[in-house]
Image: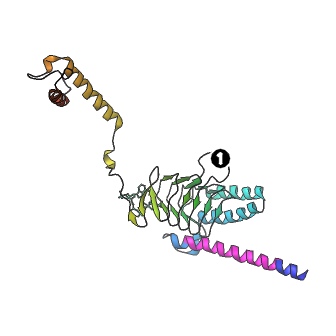
Amino acid sequence: MVANRRGKISQLNARFFGARDTFQDDLRAARERDPAAHSTSEILLYQGLHAVWLHRVAHGLYLREHRFSARLISQISRFLTGIEIHPGARIGRGLFIDHGMGVVIGETTEIGDDVTLYQGVTLGGTGKQGGKRHPTVGDRVIVGTGAQVLGPLVIGHDAKIGAGAIVVKDVPPETTVVGNPGRPVMISGTRVAGPDIEHARLPDPVAESLETLTRRVTELEHHADPAQRGPGQVDPASNGNSANRSAHAEAREIPTSGEG
Ligand SMILES: CC(C)(COP(=O)(O)OP(=O)(O)OC[C@H]1O[C@@H](n2cnc3c(N)ncnc32)[C@H](O)[C@@H]1OP(=O)(O)O)[C@@H](O)C(=O)NCCC(=O)NCCS
């Protein structure tokens, strides 16, 4: 009887100190990763920290099958912080949610240790399927503001997801991914060569189609009206390969104005 009681007390002790260490790690994470933090008392006001701590309580209840109370705490936390973490999500030590507002973390999400999330991040599913449907995020991963990480994919340790990226495929460890769809720009500190796109002059498919059509009409008009062909020019539709080619080449250079 006494041994039983002692066993229970030491179990409670272990749980208490384990929880205390985890909560301290969350505090340390905010202190280390927020350059704007000046003191511990200031950090205690962060809603990102409140959301993570409330989630740890909710997750404990969820694991003990107290699903309603778990969900209630999660909803209260969402109301107070603007951060929605499903009580089923498994979150490692030292999660730092900076600014927080608009973060959504789905039920089957798994997050490693020392991960940083910024405001507006979604770790979500792609549809209504059941089972494991949310991301698994490795240790020390950074997910930039507004990034959407969707589906049961794996983000490797030390990866960085750029602000505003949409990621629907696995990301290898130590890789930086940006854009939509997310593409790697950095692997283990080395830049990945990408297509040379001048962002200020992106292609305009509608203008290109119109230009092609105008050129084609000019060519056809030129072929149809022998008066417009210069001396020595052969109807390209007839024969004479080299003559055909020069007629085509000239036709491309004829301005469209004043014709037809
Ligand atoms: C993705 C990120 C981690 C990359 O940082 P980095 O390792 O220093 O890499 P660089 O800044 O050298 O960027 C590498 C390339 O990706 C591009 N890039 C960087 N971030 C990008 C983004 N979010 N979206 C699109 N392209 C991006 C850069 O322009 C650069 O392209 P280039 O090679 O053509 O010049 C960082 O830009 C980022 O988005 N961090 C999130 C920070 C955040 O959310 N802060 C919120 C504070 S409130």
Q: Is residue 134 above or below residue 45?
A: above
Q: Is-magenta flag for residue 29?
A: yes
Q: How many marks?
A: 1
Extreme-left residue of the structure: 231
Q: Assign the N terminus to one quadrant of the image.
A: bottom right
Task: State whether label 1 is within 8 Å of ligand 1.
Answer: no
Q: Is residue 206 left or right of residue 252?
A: right
Q: Nearer the viewer, residue 114 or 43?
A: 114
Residue 166 lies, in percent from the top left, at 50, 51
Q: Amino acid at mark 1?
A: Gln
Q: Is residue 202 above or below residue 173?
A: above
Quadrant assignment, res 106: bottom right
Give the main secondary structure, helix, strand or loop, of the magenta stretch.
Answer: helix
Q: Residue at horizontal 34%, vertical 39%?
A: 204
Disc 1 is placed on an element classified as loop
Q: Nearer the viewer, residue 45 or 220?
A: 220
Q: Residue at horizontal 65%, vertical 46%?
A: 129
Magenta segment, which residues? 8-30
Q: Residue at horizontal 66%, vertical 76%?
A: 21
Quadrant of the image where one finds ligand 1? bottom left
Q: Assign the C terminus to one quadrant of the image.
A: top left
Q: Is residue 44 left or right of residue 1?
A: left
Q: Residue at horizontal 81%, vertical 79%?
A: 9
Residue 84 lies, in percent from the top left, at 63, 55
Q: Nearer the viewer, residue 55 or 131?
A: 131
Residue 37 lies, in percent from the top left, at 52, 71
